[in-house]
Image (cartoon, grey):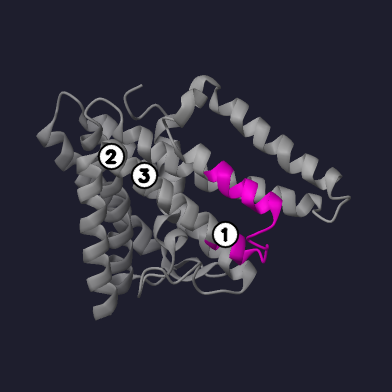
Amino acid sequence: MAQRLVTGIVAGAFFVAMLLLGNWYYTLLLALLAVLGFREYVKLNGLPAGRGDVLCGFAAVLLLSLPRMPFGWDVLPIATWMWLILFVLLAATVLSKNRIDLAQASLLFLGTVYIGLGFRFMAETRDLPHGVFWALLTFFCIWASDAGAYFVGKAIGKTKLWPEISPNKTVEGAVGGLIIAILVALVFCLFEPDWLGYGRAIGFALAAAVAGTLGDLIQSAYKRFRGVKDSGNLLPGHGGVLDRTDSWLIVFPLVHFLHLLPQ
């Protein structure tokens, strides 16, 4: 527990410092986390990291995670890049005469979109007007929901939320985490009421808490399917990158799609 606490404090402080610095400091940190997360994903699926299609996957994750692409490549819409990645992976099944099969190509495409776009939307949130405020609001709602669910669940949790996937999660914990996330969002209203009204804050917290819990369950289901406890061991006491960012990867795109952030 002590190791987990120390790692969490140090890693969290460094991450928030990079977020506050912004610019390429934060963007490159997110891109690095995206590549490390994809490496864990590749390992979870038993794919050879040095194979051509897997290397294309690494390049694709890096490409998708950058909100501002180098060499003027951002003249192409992100949907075009996603189609090109899909095309390359499907073409690999033909060129390899099915040594790279459709299942492997599908897994790689799923991983590039899930991880690459998730981190891209984190970077795009920081690039919004008043981006520090919106990024911190999103992270604090996620963290508040996660911490609230843990402590409330430990204190009064009795009804299992989804025991087949995550046996420790409880309905009481999930509700407690949701309430605490709402309270955190309302505190943000007090600091900048012109940017964030009370109704929007509640909607934001609801989306972050529910989607964050689902993101956690998605990763838990996948790890259970693969028969592993953690996606990696980069962070002592916390597991890997995907273990720590599973909620982020779902929440950040969703709050953009729901227009809960400035457009």
Disc nearer the start of the sequence (3/1): 3
Under tag 3, what secondary structure?
helix
Dot 2 surroundings within 10 Å: few (below 14), some, or many (20 or more)? many
Could you say which quadrant of the image residue 9 lies in?
Answer: bottom left
Residue in the picture at 33% in, 62% down: 149
Q: State the residue position of label 2.
A: 135
Residue 213 visible to an observer of this rendering:
no
Q: State the residue position of label 3.
A: 28
Which quadrant would the N terminus be assigned to in this image? bottom left
- On screen, residue 92 versus residue 184, left or right, reads right
x then y, percent, for residue 46: 67, 66
**Circle nearer the viewer, 3 or 1:** 3
Residue in the picture at 37% in, 58% down: 174
Dot 3 surroundings within 10 Å: few (below 14), some, or many (20 or more)? some
Above or below: residue 79 compared with residue 100: above
Which quadrant would the C terminus be assigned to in this image? top left
Above or below: residue 190 compared with residue 177: above
Residue 91 visible to an observer of this rendering:
yes
Q: Which residues are magenta?
A: 40-61
Given the image, on which type of amino acid does mark 2 rest? Ala
Disc nearer the start of the sequence (2/1): 1
x then y, percent, for residue 150: 32, 67
Q: Which residue is nearer to you in this view: 179 or 51?
A: 51
Dot 1 surroundings within 10 Å: few (below 14), some, or many (20 or more)? many
Label the magenta part by its dominant secondary structure: helix
